[in-house]
Amino acid sequence: MNRIGGRGASRPWRTTFVTAAVATVATVALLATACGTETPGKLQTVGDIAGLPVTHFESGFKPNAPTPRLAVRNVSGSQEDKVAVAAIADVSDYWTQLFPRHFGQQFRPVRSLLSYDPEADEIEVCGATTADAAMNAFYCPPEDLVAWDRSMLLPLLRERFGPMAIVTVLGHEYGHAVQYRLGERAGIDEQTSTIVKEQQADCFTGAYFRWMAEDNSKYFTVSTSEGLNQVMASLFFIRDEPGQSAAEASAHGTAFDRTYAFQLGFEQGALKCADIDQAEVDSRITEQPFDPNDSSGGDLRISEETVALLQRSLDQAFAGAQVETPKIVDDGGSCPDGPDTAPASYCPEGNTVSIDLATLADFGQPIDREAEFRGTESDGGLGDFAAFAEIASRYVQGIQHGVGASVDNANAGLRTSCLVGAWAGAISGDDHDNVLRLSPGDLDEAIAELLQPRSLIAADLNGHRVANGFARVESLRQGYLQGSQVCTRSYN
């Protein structure tokens, strides 16, 4: 985050959270309470995932999955290549079936496939060699080729996130081949920006995974809880670095942008993906350079001073609720004889948010990107906004409680996350009345927190949280992009 100290970059849209707060919290006042006897921290399975039931099982190969008959140059017998080849066969099946239905023409599968080991192979491809393409997977339009690094990238993805991460990456690369087949129908030409192409490809991947989740795949099965969690985590992992501009030739998007595009495809299908263009991307993309006046480099230290700024920011945002706002106090992170969701808890009896400042300060340390790639333990945290958002989640429960709304029913966690997103949207612009402003990477820190097993942003009063990361991330996104009123409509 950034404290206000200079003029920030303007945004093409704004969120009217302050004025919408009264309507949002007032209409949820009569919701019934529930979950009073559950164990604190228990996972909840509520609602659906874009109309599909919430399912829990191990995702990956189906027990009787066939062996793909594909010609793949330089392929090995590794588990990574087995998943990769099946993924290519599977996504090709998807487009062969759905392309005529969506776009009125037959689909032509990708002509060439290549597996490579960048440390052992030096194969000429797409004007370069595979030795220069470590930790990469790509589509080469002139050769109509999809290639992947089987010895570094794919093992890392499978070990960190499971087999569906490999399927995600190759589904994305195949999406680029689809773009070139669609051409003008997808708005793709030599002038199309990289970010539009990448957002489309992520969206096409989401549409493909919806088909898989509906049990249409011969090769894979994916649960809408743990399976999609793997997908969301892998999209977070392959995000762009904070501060990169969406106008750069290498821009792929923040984790917020990439998960948004994937969810758009999953929820609305491939036709919606083909409609993504520069105007649509510009209207909601979050990838932007750091403000020149951001002296903290996007990360504030979690301290008494910055928590006081957070208090002021939240009080400003919720002034329209016309209730007594909760006070944030550093007194251990749990409530005497009440809720214990340390390191931050909302205490209804005193209308306070109890925090453990020292623990949150550690949690708010910058993400260690090198440790992420190594897959090792990190001395860092999840970033300042992850810590601030956890405190904010307990604060917005106080606002809801103040108007009589339930903060421990089945949807309370998602409504809370949505309201945190709406607060984030309200401070995303360059309004000098704001005491805090989002910095590049802040929303990704919130997504990192939402994908944690112990996520607090999307937890109810007692720490019960929704089991699937897809719904958690979606709730934050809805609030951020649409404002607080959607939180009541979606999570009543």
Image (cartoon, grey):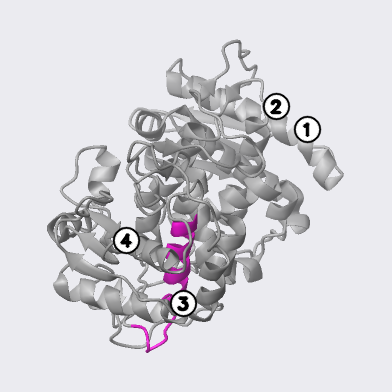
- In primary-sequence order, the first of circles 1 and 4 is 1
The local secondary structure at tag 3 comes to helix
- Inter-mark Cα distance, 1 to 4: 54 Å
Check disc 4 and report the residue beneath it: 348
- In primary-sequence order, the first of circles 4 and 3 is 3
- In primary-sequence order, the first of circles 2 and 3 is 2
**Image position of 288 (left or right of 5):** right
> Does the segment drawn in magenta span residue 417?
yes
> In the picture shown, does residue 25 fall above or below 219?
below
Label 4 vs label 3, nearer the camera = 4
**Image position of 188 (left or right of 197):** right
Check disc 3 and report the residue beneath it: 321
- Inter-mark Cα distance, 4 to 3: 17 Å
Q: Residue at x 42, y 48 (%)?
A: 236
Residue 190 seen in the current view? yes
Name which residue type carries label 4: Pro
Question: Which mark is drawn over residue 216?
Answer: 2
- Inter-mark Cα distance, 2 to 3: 47 Å
Name which residue type carries label 2: Asn
Rendering coords of residue 77 (x, y %): 46, 15
Within 10 Å of disc 4 (Cα), the crowding (few <14, some 14-19, many 20+) is some
Are dots 2 and 1 in contact, CB under 8 Å?
yes
Residue 141 seen in the current view? no
Check disc 1 and report the residue beneath it: 97
Q: Nearer the viewer, residue 384 or 404?
A: 404
Which residue sits furthest top? Answer: 64
The local secondary structure at tag 4 comes to loop
